[in-house]
């Protein structure tokens, strides 16, 4: 009987993993919580494409090497914002001036209790990244917000882009919390903004501790 060979590709950074893959990983991870064996099985299955029935057959030295490689980048989610990205043959630009973001876009973002990478994240990304209409060097204009979101296209955008955008919100939230609370009274804060910013900080703190569950 011929032996079946399995080629395992281990990602070196978040640019090798899409939002679609990450959300599937998150969903399966809910079953295992912080249990190490289940956590590693999810990583191997979703990020390295190892069939679940083969994971237990991996040689211990190979298992250890893959684990080390994954831990090299799993916790590095404080990535830079990518202001211009390409999806298919079209360029999308991040909202150039958040202080002047359309009120409808603002409302659609703040209707969520938290801004974190979950099933709602693709919708938020589709609000923030819109098709570029004009570009000169690093300056660009994007389409006006129309309230119509084609969010599914962001499922195949890689996680370096998503974490970059999320980390931007984390940095923004730190500045906003300091500045807003200094300049405004509590009752004058925009709807939901304080709770959103606080929850963002909590979410990023959890992400920064991501790899410690199996270290």
Image (cartoon, rainbow, N blue to C red):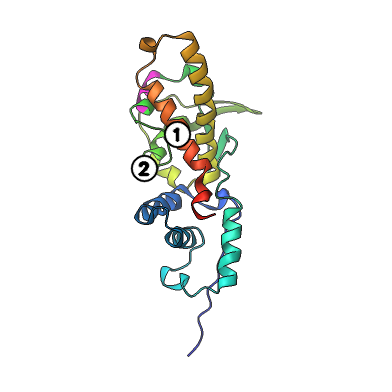
Position of 105 relative to 122 (above/below):
above
Using the rendered view, name the quadrant where residue 41 is placed: bottom left
Rendered residue at 54%/28% (across/down)? 171
Q: Is residue 134 left or right of residue 34?
A: right
Residue underneath mark 1: 202
Q: Position of residue 211 (x, y in %)?
A: 53, 50
Q: Which mark is residue 119?
A: 2
> What residue occupies the far bottom of the structure in this picture?
1
Using the rendered view, name the quadrant where residue 144 is placed: top left
Gap between marks 1 and 2, in whole Å? 18 Å
Q: Position of residue 81 (x, y in %)?
A: 57, 34
Magenta region: which residues?
A: 103-108
Residue 191 shows in this picture: yes
Q: Is residue 135 left or right of residue 38?
A: right
Look at the image and say whether residue 148 sits in the magenta stretch. Answer: no
Q: Nearer the viewer, residue 142 or 13?
A: 13
Q: Is most of the magenta stretch helix, strand or loop? A: helix
For the image shown, how many numbered marks are present on the structure? 2
Q: Earlier in the sequence, mark 1 or mark 2?
A: 2
Rendered residue at 38%/56% (across/down)? 32
């Amino acid at each position: 009987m011929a032996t079946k060979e399995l080629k395992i590709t281990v990602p070196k950074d978040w640019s090798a993993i899409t939002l679609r893959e990450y959300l599937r990983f998150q969903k399966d991870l809910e079953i295992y919580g912080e249990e190490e064996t289940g956590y590693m099985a999810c990583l191997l299955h979703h990020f390295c494409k190892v069939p679940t029935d083969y994971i237990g057959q991996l040689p211990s030295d190979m298992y250890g090497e893959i684990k080390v490689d994954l831990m090299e980048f799993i916790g590095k989610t404080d990535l830079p914002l990518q202001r211009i990205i390409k999806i298919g043959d079209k360029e999308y630009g991040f909202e150039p001036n958040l202080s002047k973001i359309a009120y409808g876009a603002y409302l659609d973002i703040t209707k969520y209790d938290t801004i974190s990478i979950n099933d709602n994240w693709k919708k938020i990304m589709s609000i923030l990244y819109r098709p570029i209409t004009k570009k000169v060097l690093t300056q660009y204009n994007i389409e006006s917000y129309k309230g119509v979101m084609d969010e599914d296209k962001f499922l195949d955008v890689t996680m370096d882009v998503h974490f970059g955008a999320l980390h931007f919100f984390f940095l923004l939230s730190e500045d906003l919390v300091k500045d807003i609370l200094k300049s405004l009274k509590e009752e004058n804060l925009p709807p939901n903004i304080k709770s959103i910013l606080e929850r963002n900080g909590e979410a990023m703190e959890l992400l920064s501790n991501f790899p410690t569950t199996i270290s």
